[in-house]
Every structure is written in structure tokens, then in C-alpha cells.
Image (tube, rainbow, N blue to C red):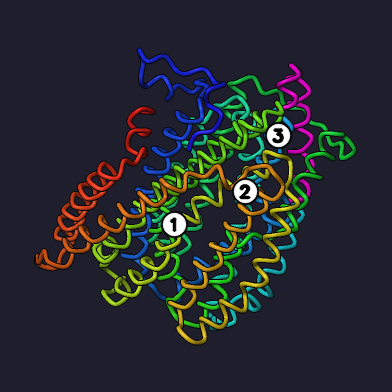
Amino acid sequence: MNAGEESIPKQSPRNPLAFLRPSASHSAFSATILLMLSTLLSGVLGLVRTKYINYIFGAGPETDAYNAAFQLPDMVAYFLVGSVASISLVTILNRYRAQGDEEGGDRALSIVLNAMIVVLGAGILLAEIFAPLYTRIAFRGFGPREAALCTSLTRILLPAQIFFFIGGVVGSRLLVRKIFIYQAITPLIYNLGIILGAVFLHQRFGIYSLAIGVLAGVILGPAVLTGFGALRDGLRYYPILNIRHPAFLEWLRLTFPLMIGVSLVTADKWILSYFASNDTGGITRLMVAKTLFIAPMGILGQAAGAASLPFFSSLFSQNRQEEFAGAVNRAVSRVIAASLLLGAWMIALAAPIVDLFRGGSFTPQDAHDTAIYFTVFALSIAFWSAQGIYARAFYAAENTVTPATAGWIITLLSIPVYSLLFRNHGLIGLTIASDIGIAVQTLTLAFLLHRRRRVPLSGLEVGEFGRTLLAACFALGGAWATVRYVHLPHSHIADFIVIALGTVAWAAASALVLGLTGSQLLRQLRARL
């Protein structure tokens, strides 16, 4: 969860809220805490959004079409700008900053931004034209009305990718300066846009209100707010279009493998949607389960991974190889240890957690099925959390080819597994295939880093994994017993009570076993806090 933070000045202990200042520069740990808080709040808003959408629209053809409508826009961004353009740009801007060439860095950023807006704009235009054809191919299980709705929603969502890209490129300048507050706030604005769109527009526009909210949230969050933060920090924009500039060519070299490479982390939802389109409501139930899974998982994996990249990049660019390897191993070890405990909580309390989203058009059967999918997804939380850090270790080492190549191979080999398990076990089979795929993806990245002598596997805290796994088993038993034997009238209030009691049992068992086994996890967290 932390990486190279010993080289970064700490915030003054006299003002514990100093890290919330817009201009605050963070250590890896304070950045992780900030992004964890952001992810927590964003996750809460995401859950409110999911609950509201479920209540109004349920799990049916309309919500299937809405969830599927994100796929083509995501693909356009993924294959034209690598989806995560800021990752490779951070490495380049770090070097300009180390050389004291702030003007050169801003010029490089502007050139990348201008050139790729032209490319992305052209790609979006083509996608608008061919959206009906794509929908027929990608979602063969959709009927004519569902396919037409999906196409219309897709066309509304496509322009959002330009604003996501602007936010990512401009935000990379803030990341280089260890300023994370804007990155922490933009997801909140995005979720609020969808919620407010549904609240105020659903009676007039129906399911289209959600797409309108998405577009408004993306413009105001990633684009406007991040742009304001970068300008406030001194960004100078240059209206230059020069595709032969060395910085653009370097960015293209680093990003091109991300453009043509497909990681299962991204492809998983595409594959799930393709097969689930044959089951009415299937896409929605799987996406609800994924949303509930990502909410707590993101607090660990996504926040730690996003916070670690600038520090990994800084250590590698200074040729501090031993510290780089140690930082990656510490981050992975702590994230996996915490994920084992969090996964136990999610599995034990899956039924009452998902039941909170029952109501309105989202039926008890929908909630029951979704809880099963959520449970299976939760089994893989440690792999999902760790792979983000391993991938960023490659990016920080200026190697995007290796993870992209591995991603293609793993994705292609996984598709038959998804197909086989779906034919034999339906939607549950898809969730099992997803777990298998992400496990293989994570282990492959770890092995490749080890083989290239970047991050030796011997540096992982294996003993800590054993202690936290034992604690997770006892915590799972305690929380599950609470759900099993506490009988209350079936209601959302009862769900909250069971979750609270189960959480107390889970926390007590975790702390007891961790203490008895001599685990360092709690001591490390207390020391950091």
C-alpha cells in the first residue's frame, strides 16, 4: 500500500487534515489513505446509484441495454488511447520535472493531448456510425427493441471518452507532483451526476436519464475539475499539433502496447456481457454483483495501485532498483493480507449485503442470484487487488509490452473457459471463469517481474499471508454464524443489524487470531496511522 514513501516529506503532524489541501503533496501512504477515503465515498455513492437504478428499472431488458451501452465507448478509449493514458505520461513528465524543465513537460503534455483528441474524436465518430452493427455482433442475445435501445444509449455515452481522456492527461501532471485531491474528488462527481440524472430526469427520459447523468458527471469531474486543478498548479497549455515531437513519439511507444493489448482486467466485463446477453436480466445481475464487489475491493487494490505508481516511477527513474523491488513487494504483501480479511467479510455477509438492494423492480429472486455471483467474485479479491500493483510496477519500469502481451495470451486462452463454464453452469459458471482468469493474470505478472529480476518473489511476506489467511477463516466462521443464527424479520433494517453484528464478530475474530499468531498487519497499520 505504500511505496518509497521514505523519500517523500511527511505532512506536519500538527494539522492532520493538511493532506486535504488542494496543493498538498503526498507520501505514498497519505495518498493511499486519501484515495481509500475517496474510493469509500465513491463506493457509497455507487451503491446508492445501484440501489436507485435497481428500484426504478430492476433487472430487465432496459437495464441490460444500459449496462451493455458502456462497452463500445470503453473499447474505443482502450484501443485508441490505451484507456489509461496518464500511466505512461507520468513516467515522461517525471523525467522533465527531475531535469527542472517544467515548460518542456507542459509542452509535451499539450502535444499528446492535442494529437490524441483528434484521433479519439475520429474514432468516436466512426463508432457512432457503426454502433448498430457492433450491438448486433456483441450482444447476440438481444431482441430488436433491446438492441435499438442499446445503440441509442451507446451513442450518447461515446463522447464521454474525450472528457475522460482530457482528465487523465491533465491529471498526470498533478500525479507527478504527488497531488491527489482532484483524483479523489472526480469519481464522486461522476457518481453524483448519474444519481442526480436519475432523480430529476427519469420520469421524462426513462433509462436515458442515466446516460445523460454519465455525460454530465464526466464533463464536470474528470475534465473541468482536473483541468482547474492543473491550471491552478501552473499548467501552461500550448495549442501545438506535432506528432514528430520526441515526447509524443516516446508516449506513443509506451502507450501503443496498451492500445493493442487486452488485459483480462478490462476484457472480463466484455466477455461476461457477451455471454450474459442470452439471459434476460443476466447482464444487470452480474454488473450489480461486480459493482458491489468493486466497491470494497477498490478501497484496497485500486487506491493502493493508483497511489503507488508515481512513487514506483520515481524510484525506478533514480535507478534505486532494490528500493523499487522492496516497495512493490511491501505494497503487494499488505494489500493481499488485507484482502484476505476483507474477502472473508464479503463472503460471510453476502446475503444481507445484496438484500439491501432488493426492492421496487429488483425482485427477491434477483437479489438471491446476485448474492451468489457476488460470493464467487469475492473469492478472487486478493488477486484483483494485487494485479493492479504488479501492472503498475511494469509501467513504472517503462515496460508496457510485457504486460500487454501477457494480457492478450491470457485473455484468448480464457475465452474458451468462459464459454465452457457458461454452457455447463450458466451465469455462475461465468463468475467462476472470471476468478480463474484473474488468478492466472496476477500470477503471470508476478512471475514475469520475478524472472526479469525486477521484483523477486522471495521478497513477499509469505508468513504474513498464512497468519492473515488463518485469521480470515476464523473471521469468516464468526460472521457466517451471525448470519446463520440471528433470526430477524425480513427487512432492510434487519439486514443492517445482521451486517453490523456480523462485522463485529468478523473484526473480533480477526483481531484475536492476528494477535495470537504474531501478525504484524495491525501493528503496521497503527504505526502508519
User: Front-most of 62 and 414?
Assistant: 414
Mark 3 residue type: Thr
**Residue type highlighted by circle 1:** Ile
Return the x and y of residue 178 as percentages of the image width and height. Answer: 56, 26
As drawn, 59 above or below 505: below
| In this rendering, position of residue 509 left or right of residue 185 | left
Residue in view at x 38 percent, y 33 percent = 524
Q: Give the range drawn in magenta.
A: 95-120
From the image, tell me which residue sits under label 3.
91
Instruction: Please give the residue where the numbered disc 2 appears in the rendered image.
Output: 391
- Vertical side of 27 occupied by 67: above or below: below
Report whether 448 appears left or right of 245.
Answer: left
Disc 1 secondary structure class: helix
Residue 431 highlighted magenta (yes or no): no
The part of the image, by quadrant, that contains residue 271 is bottom right
Instruction: Evaluate whether residue 43 shows in this view.
Output: yes
Task: Please give the name of the residue rendered at 81% of the width and 45% of the height, measured from the top-left corner.
Answer: 253
Distance CA(mark 3)–CA(mark 1): 28 Å
Q: Which of marks 3 and 2 is nearer the N terminus?
A: 3
Q: Quadrant of the C terminus?
A: top left
